Amino acid sequence: MALHEGDPGSLGGYRIVDRLGAGGMGVVYRARAGSGREVAVKVVHAQYAEDPVFRVRFRQEIAAVRKVSGAFTAPVVDADPEAPRPWMATQYVPGRPLSARVRDDGPLAGAELRRLVLGLVEALRDIHRAGVVHRDLKPANVLMAEDGPRVIDFGVSRAAENQALTETGHMMGTPPFMSPEQLADARSVGPASDVFSLAALVVFAATGRGPFDTDSPYLTAYRVMSEEPDLTAVPGPLRAVLSRCLAKGAAERPGLDALAAEFAAALPEPAATEPPTVPHRRADPDPTRPPASTWPPAADPDPTGLPAADSEPTWPPAADPDPTGLPAADSASTWPPAADPDPTGLPAADSEPTWSPAADPDPTGLPAADPEPTWPPAVDVEPTRLPAADPEPTRLPAPGPTRSPMADLEPTRLPDPDPTRPPRAAPSASVPYRAPAAADPGVAEAAPVPDAAGDAPVSRTRRPRVPLAVGMAGVLVAALTAYLFGPFQAGERPGAAPAPGATATRWGALPAGWRPWRTTVYAVAAHGVKRSSAPADGPGHGGQPSCALSGGAVYCAGDTTLPIRVDAVTGRTIWRAGAQPPGTPLDHYGSAVVGVREGAVLVRESVLNTAGNDTTTTVTAFAAADGRRLWSRPTGEGNAAVTLVGGLVLVPDGLTVTARSPRDGSARWTTSVPAGHHCDFHGAGGRVYADCTGYHTPSGARRRLTALDPADGSARPLPAAPSLTADYAGTLDGRLVYAARRSGDPTARDNPYTGVEVIDPRTGTRETHALAGAYRGRAAMAHGVLCLAASDGLTTAVSPLTGGRVWRTATTLERPAAPVADGRDSVFLASASGRVAALDARTGHRLWESYPRAATVVGGDYDSPELLVNGGALVVTTPDGTLFSLDPARPGRKPAPA
């Protein structure tokens, strides 16, 4: 993952090489020591670094985890808890997380599953012997190295967890893999909690689904605490072992020594002739190591393949001098915890919850992307693509005056409005944030999520609930607030693609011959100007490129960037136009693509004079086939909004606007616009509308809306116009839709949206509806709803006809561009880092998020990525000039260089 602006160049003598990811506790980097040894360095977030209690616990945790060593753990090799931003370094393990392995290649079986399970048992034994409880064992915390699994991030989250436990609504852990006692009171967890998490993780590895999966984290937690696990897809012998490990009571679960033998018996070693099942194995650098198919070595008298142990590790372990000199009662290596009051001295847990939409439910700060991912998988089946989109979602009526206190925990679910649609699986990671259904009229409800096999949800026998110290509703609301509002899906990381079979049937057909690709606007062109020199500061510092898609090609231009044509199927740069005037430095030239029509690429060009105090603006047409200049006309004002509407290029020129032919620039008609007004032009229902705003008119600021006949330009002023603070968002059945900001400075980006305005040109009327809340970000119409994407990735859909909220979903994208709809039922977001998120337009369900593809992360508030839909593929350009295309059915496929 590309380093961000502000990332350190080195830490503690380690040179920072790459950013691996970020989580609730900190940021993780891949770093290299002077000797060449690579490590993973975790740097604690500033809010923890400033807390003295956290620093005490962090020192104690480092002292505890330093004692952990074993073949299947990534040990701590260095740390500095006294640094301004405390950090620790662990062994760097090249390999995919288990979550990615299952996502890409399906569930594990045979020798690979055996090696994983027995390796995890040994890893937990090593961790527990050191007096540490992992607390967050999940697929993302298990790396699939060539010589066996590695458990990472053990114990260190305890320091942050003790801090979070004093704040209502904050928690550490991932509900699908948390034990009942951890959900009820994280202070009380011991080694048996890790056994529960281990079993849930093994179910996921063997089946691709967790034992308590639902589409709601509330219901997932409820099932963990009150219902039997779903083990129907687990092989018989393994099922019995896992059932005991998933017992609700901690005392009912077996110990790790017993589990080693039971797992070895339930997963018999395959015959020596069976080839290993680990995908994408490279040649073993150590030819003396036993092959995977004979692991553990046959000569080992212990059938588990684990080191001999005289007995179950005692808990707590033998006393060990604490090198920190701090009281042992606060240390994670002491079990059970002392019954003393909360040493933090912070407010009680029933205080007002603190919520940050950008909070990350993955508190471990684990690497968010594989350091060296292997793409594509060895076996890759092309998903089935449907011919039509799903129908409009079913909507609930307004709620009555009475609400159940559990309404937010178990919302009513409606049957699927389209019984013919292929069912979707519900993977462990498929848990978006959705607002409580009963809280808002018009909120769309998701249909019941079927099992992976496509059957309806299986009814499960409920057993008596475990007595808890607090009420069920209180536990779930307090424990899951951070998880719900956090950006990552459970058990996932950025770059996570749809789980096997989850969403592979919803996308359109790919263009013939298409492949994933990645290039830049600075790439060498086959024809015309070979190369567009990047700015002096390097690629990515020249301004936001703009692009348009037409006829299987992408046309782009930008500040300091000459117009180019890129093949949308292969990513090859076909031509670069020689648009830069002779003698003009490239940093005085800027361009933006207006659109493509009639074989002409329309570009708005700006040239700054030598003195740097005046700009000449023109609209220029280039031949789409070869980049030849076809025609050019000046515009009347520096910031003129040249617009392509239908088959016309609208060119403002002071007091008039002229409609020109895209092919030859000839004038079709000219009409007047209000004096002293800046006009934007929109198309709706086959007509053109001039949306003109004047801030210095005799009567003060005002806004006018005029309908223009595209045939002759005849003007018809409309009696209704949008308010001065409203931003155009799109159309709905021939009507113009605006997102209205709170009264104040209409140009202020931080002025939130509080209403929606719909203007019907046929009747000349305007409807105004208040929104349920105040929303910041970028607004756009998508599939009949108004989508608002906030800078922290939180995306809300509201009805333009009522203002009521339809759905709300958290994503991990930072400062995403305005949402973009495809031709079916999906909405896409893209960020400056080149990350893309896909949402279901009907329910807001988050389908996937891709890994970043930008070379560098640059851009300010006015720079944003651009996303185009190319049939069944997506094309994205980022502010640094990166241009790439991905398949939404398989977004994790690594692109080939163009």
Image (cartoon, rainbow, N blue to C red):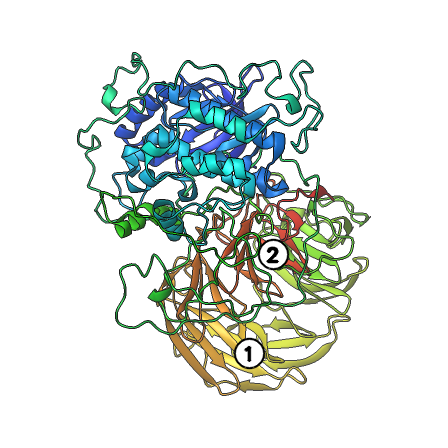
* Residue 735 vertical placement versus 110 (above, below): below
Q: In this view, does 352 lie to the left or right of 237?
A: left
Examine the rendered structure and indicate whether residue 551 appears above or below residue 564.
Answer: below
Query: Dot 2 surroundings within 10 Å: few (below 14), some, or many (20 or more)?
Result: many
Coordinates of residue 583 in the picture (x, y in percent)? 72, 49
According to the image, label 2 marks what residue?
Answer: 867
Occupied quadrant, residue 686: bottom right
Q: Depth check: 657 or 12 in front?
A: 12
Front residue (pair 19, 352):
352
Among the 4 quarters of the image, the one containing residue 60: top left
Label placed on residue 733: 1
**Left or right: 537 with respect to 173?**
right
Vertical order, 61 against 300 (above or below): below
- Which three-letter amino acid code belongs to the residue tagged 1? Asp
- Tell me: 633 left or right of 529: left
Q: What element carries label 1?
A: loop
Residue 874 percent location from the top left of the image: 65, 55
- For badge 2, the amino acid type reads Leu
Instruction: Locate the N terminus by quadrant.
Output: top right
**Residue at (61, 76) in percent of width and height:** 657
Q: Can residue 812 be seen in this view?
A: yes
Whole-percent x, y for residue 554 in the image: 71, 56
* Residue 685 percent coordinates (x, y): 60, 80
Which element is circle 2 on?
A: strand
For the point 49% across and 57% down, the residue is 449
Instruction: Kindly identify the residue that appears in the image at 68 percent across and 66 percent down.
Output: 387
